[in-house]
Image (cartoon, rainbow, N blue to C red):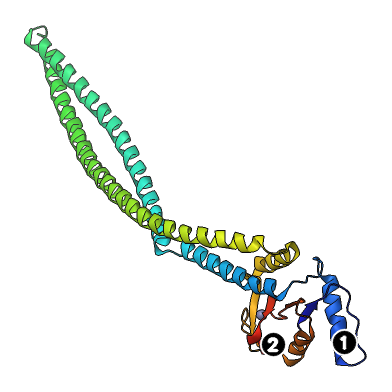
Amino acid sequence: MAQVYHGRPVHGSGPGPAGTRQDGLRRACVGLTLVCVKASPQTQLRLLELADLDTELARLGHRRRGLPEVAELAGLEVKSGELRDALVVTETELGDLTREQSRAERDVEQVRTRIEKDRARLDAGQVSAARELASLQSEIENLHRRQGDLEEVVLELMERQEGLESRRDELAADRDRLGSEIADVTSRRDAVFAEIDEQAAKASDQRSGVAADMPADLLALYDQIRKTKGNGAALLRAGRCEGCHLTIDAADLKAIRAAAPDDVVRCEECRRILVRTPESGL
Ligand SMILES: [Zn+2]
């Protein structure tokens, strides 16, 4: 049912469907939190400009959010985060390995010093007893074996370190490549953003201009509808609401036809303000 907002309560004109309809209209009018709104047909016509501008602003907002560059950047940022994490893990492993290697090198050094000391004793002829001599020689042999084992460990650690270093370098190179890719996509996105924002600023300015000419109560009603519908008014064209594209039923059309030109009427389906023009099919 179309609702007609009159500036005063509407009384039913008698029994039958027409009376019931007008009672319904009156109830809807009273139930509305805003006062019932009236506006000249010219002013109502300007609501369509407002609706067009709001549709344009919504389209631009949608375009801004839906840019392929926005999704692409989100994907690249995820990859970049993964790379950063992998780099931290590799750097940590490298740090641990470097410490382990220093320890192993110190051990080798200790064994080497010990060998030198033993050998010096041997060379100096400090040891003469056969048993002591044999024991010292055997110790030197053992120390040589131990040195060999430890050097083996150091070599293995160096190999692991080289592997980790080349992994770190690869990751760092990937990070740098990704960084410049992100910079490229960001500048592409920002260029489109700038273009969209310029159009939006223009539409927004125009909207402010139109809104400034609107009576406060009509604008408040329009804005309240806009919150859920994107825009708050639609043309009634050939008996059809251009907002929800539904045909107004005959009874509602009759009520709209009966409304005064400065009554603000609304679509029963989408609740938008219906703007009447000679194209409305009334
Ligand atoms: Zn509608």
Q: Nearer the viewer, residue 158 or 192?
A: 192
- Is residue 125 found left or right of 39 in the rendered image? left
Q: Residues within 10 Å of mark 2 (few under 14, many from 20)?
A: many
Q: Position of residue 165 (x, y in %)?
A: 24, 41
Q: Position of residue 114 (x, y in %)?
A: 18, 17
Q: Does the rendering let one see residue 130? A: no
Residue drawn at the location 17% of the way across and 31% of the way down: 151
Q: Is the C terminus in the top left, top right, bottom left or bottom right quadrant?
A: bottom right
Label 2 CB less than 8 angstroms from ligand 1: no
- Is residue 110 found left or right of 85 in the rendered image? left
The mark found on residue 20 in the picture is 1
Q: Earlier in the sequence, mark 2 or mark 1?
A: 1
Residue drawn at the location 38% of the way across and 56% of the way down: 191
Taking the image in four quarters, ligand 1 sits in the one at bottom right
Disc 2, SS: loop
- Is residue 17 found left or right of 70 in the rendered image? right
Asked if residue 198 is positioned above or below residue 83 in the image, the reply reads below
Q: Does the rendering let one see residue 232? A: yes
The residue singled out by tag 2 in the image is 248
Q: Image quarter for residue 93? A: top left
Direction right: furthest residue: 14
Q: Position of residue 199 (x, y in %)?
A: 47, 61
Label 2 to label 1: alpha-carbon separation: 18 Å
Asked if residue 197 is positioned above or below residue 232 in the image, the reply reads above
Q: Nearer the viewer, residue 225 or 236?
A: 236
Q: Is the N terminus in the top left, top right, bottom left or bottom right quadrant?
A: bottom right
Residue drawn at the location 73% of the way across and 88% of the way down: 253
Residue drawn at the location 43% of the way across and 63% of the way down: 67
Q: Amino acid at mark 2?
A: Ile
Q: Amino acid at mark 1?
A: Thr
